[in-house]
Image (cartoon, rainbow, N blue to C red):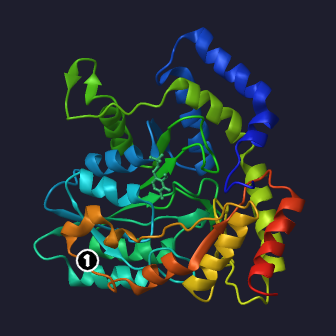
Amino acid sequence: MIPIVDLKDQYQSIRKEVIEAVTGVMDSCQFILGAETKKLEQEVEAYTGSKYAVAVGNGTDAILLTLKAYGIKQGDAVITSTFTYYATAGAIARCGARPVFCDIDPKTYNISPEGLKKLVKDGKQGLEIKAVIPVDLYGEIADMDEILAIAKECNLKVIEDAAQAFGAEYKGKKAGSFGDAGCFSFYPGKNLGAYGDAGMVVTTEESLADLLRVYRNQGNKVKYHHIVIGHNSRMDAIQAAILRVKLQYIDKWNSKRRAIAKFYDEKLKGLDIVTPFVSKDKTHIYHLYVIRFKDKEQKDNVKKLLYEEGVDARTYYPIPLHLQDCFKYLGYRKGDFPEAEKASEETLAIPIYPELTEKQQGFIVDTIKRSIGK
Ligand SMILES: Cc1ncc(COP(=O)(O)O)c(C=O)c1O
């Protein structure tokens, strides 16, 4: 079986360093936050060019705590893409605000700046739109210049969900560093993945970073003085130590992903399959390599043959968020966001990870070609 992501070979390649790093934490007996987490925060600050980094328990909390630290609450609205992982919109609902969904640009699968402009202009009856959360879907940064311009005009906070895009660039700037805050997930399957849950917020605002440190630690400013209703969302030191090892390899691994993407791009050219679009000023990190077929039937057939041949290919995301049961109360209907709905039917992610061999890549391409009769 060729899985959609395989963590085993990568672990073997860094096993010695990881074990040393974990042993260091065990010997220090400093298991929560502590020196390792502080060092990781400093390294991520340097890597992303952000002034402050705050390590938290997971990527979902990175978004949720940022919304809370900005005082976003019931009666407020926050715009995000309907074509993203649940966690982005779940965090909006969990802070009490109303998620307002936006359609995607069918070329990039990221939030459509035109759609955003329209939503902001229309307003949301009785609710104040406080923020927008663009998602750097699949590892490509959203159209940040346009999004930031719209947000500035309307005084919206921009919280970049960079969970899938560690190391991606737009005009030479790193993912996470565009808006008021950037949120990362270090879930094991991410391109920079811990060996458990972990997440981080980066920002240039000192006051936000200070408040996030309070929110992640039970609302404590000083021990036993709780100034807000906080969470228990502290990164554990073992995850920080592992991430520090992996951070040294991230550029090499991201380049490897790009090389595999280039191979796929070339081999799938001229087959009536849409390969990922990357504009000239962006550097994709291909957390996922997503291709698009002429219709759902063709996509399903390819997926089926790949599966029969031992290749795990998946659709991210098969049900856009506006059609999820948990968001029924928002009153959206099928047809509200046609681009996202079409993408959810016609797209398929095929395996991509740095250790995927040339033979495996070739086999995946040949199987796709066979399925569509080429
Ligand atoms: C776009 C996006 N946002 C948020 C998250 C949430 O991150 P986590 O699983 O670390 O909570 C994820 C990953 O799962 C994601 O892909």
Q: Secondary structure at mark 1?
A: loop
Front residue of this view, candidates 84 and 62: 84
Apparent side of residue 126 relative to residue 27 in the rendered image (left or right): left
Quadrant of the image containing the N terminus? bottom right
Q: Amino acid at mark 1?
A: Tyr
Apparent side of residue 345 relative to residue 275 in the rendered image (left or right): left
Front residue of this view, candidates 349 and 30: 349
Give the residue displayed 52% in from the left and 83% down from the top. 106
Q: Position of residue 85 (x, y in %)?
A: 45, 60
Quadrant of the image containing the C terminus? bottom right
Badge 1 crowding class, 10 Å Cα cut-off, few under 14, some 14 to 19, many 20 or more, is: some
Mark 1 beta carbon near ligand 1 (under 8 Å): no
Residue 171 visible in the picture: no
Against 12, residue 360 (above or below) is below
Give the residue displayed 25% in from the left and 51% down from the top. 94
Give the residue displayed 72% in from the left and 61% down from the top. 311
Q: Position of residue 233 (x, y in %)?
A: 38, 34
Residue to which mark 1 is pinned: 332
Residue 190 visible in the picture: yes
User: How many labels, in total?
Assistant: 1
Give the residue displayed 33% in from the left and 67% down from the top. 324
